[in-house]
Image (cartoon, rainbow, N blue to C red):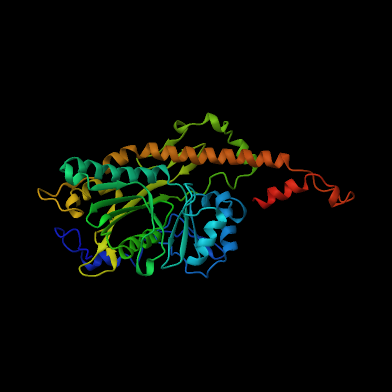
Amino acid sequence: MERDNPWPQHPTPPPSLLQGLASPPPGRSNAFTVGDSGFIGNTDVATVRASKFLSIQECAHKFREWHSGGGTLSSPKNREKSLVLKVSARDLVNLKELLGIDDESDKKFPLYTFNSASSTLTFRCFPSPIHGQVVSTISEGFYLALFGLPANTKSKIYIIAPKKYIRFYAKYDGSEIISDIAVQIYNDMGNEVKFILEVGLSESYEKLVEDAQLWLEGTKTVSVVMLVKLYEDPPYNGPTHDLTDEEFNALQFPPKNEINQQSFVVNGQCGPATYKGLTWVGSISGFIEIWGFEGASRSACRISDRIDLLSADKSMENYFSMSNFIDIADNDHPIRFDWATYFENLRSHIKELAFNRCYITLRDRNRQVNASSSLPAPPNRQLGEANVTGGGELANILSNL
């Protein structure tokens, strides 16, 4: 099935708009690598590494460290980042079975994607409130556009919440991916996905581009992918992580259950958010790109200018319409995304994220203190290892780090 550029009414972007894809905007890379795995965090462009393949056991070990926040990955800055591993499609089947995350499981964690073209397995964290509000903004725009459609047309359009997709073709066969939003159109061929939203705060721009290529080149129906890349400046690094016990106690944090979102001060519309003189969320910014096909090319590319998120409310006015995705006889039925309301509410979502981070920090600190006070005494070598009580418990504690 041939797919045409869904915006014939818009002029083709000049080549200069597409040149920026190979050269990212100035910024600081924050890629964290452990062995042959990588954490791709709040970066402008962080390459998904073409490292050697990891064994199933190595992947399982990396995953458990990432999931537990222990071992070499105990730093708070890694808690909100994705874990990227190089694994073959064959080993992926065994790894999912080993970790108990097969396709039949109804567990919602961990969220993962697999790109068979690059053999890249990515474990994702739960989306932050800031990420989630972008998803809501785009979803609401589509729902509002549906109201003006004839009933027989409206019934053919589905706005799909995050859902796993597994049907891909050519070099992407075997891939698995979860969209932030998918717009499906029901026609004679069945339910066909036409539009995809991918949002990244913890995901890198490079990872979003790879996802766009997978959707566009790996399916026979998707014609439009919207990328929303969010940045946090400075990236979160756990403001108390490097403090000594004396320095931490001097801050006099109340019990974790006594803090609330109103404890945090958000400076400006987009942050940062502070509490106890520490920054819990940096300033939020971002941009939007639209990806599709250029002319008769079957290669995915950016088909719009890069749109600064702060100006998106005016820049994207009348940019989309329902006629881009389904035949409508009477008019285009424009889709408008209310970015102004997004920014009006952004302060509350920044506070929510700051509260979550602080609460987890205090919870984990309490657990560390309690664990330290409950550790068994060192073995009495004069009695011999076999007579030492508590050794098994200590081994279990250490093995779970």
Residue at the farthest right position: 382
Q: Is 304 rendered above or below residue 126?
A: below
**Residue at 33% of width from left, 64% of height from top?**
218
Q: Is 256 rendered above or below residue 216?
A: above
**Residue at 22% of width from left, 50% of height from top?**
316
**Residue at 53% of width from left, 29% of height from top?**
258
- Estimate the x, y position of residue 206 in percent, counting from the top left: 39, 61
Q: Is residue 156 left or right of residue 51?
A: left
**Residue at 29% of width from left, 44% of height from top?**
139
Q: Nearer the viewer, residue 8 or 21?
A: 8
Quarter occupied by the N terminus:
bottom left
Q: Nearer the viewer, residue 244 or 358?
A: 358
Is residue 338 visible to the viewer in this orientation of the structure? no
Is residue 191 visible to the viewer in this orientation of the structure? yes
Q: Is residue 311 left or right of residue 70?
A: left
Q: Is 224 rendered above or below residue 76?
A: below
- Estimate the x, y position of residue 12 in percent, counting from the top left: 18, 64
Q: Is residue 336 left or right of residue 266?
A: left
- Estimate the x, y position of residue 76 in percent, counting from the top left: 54, 48
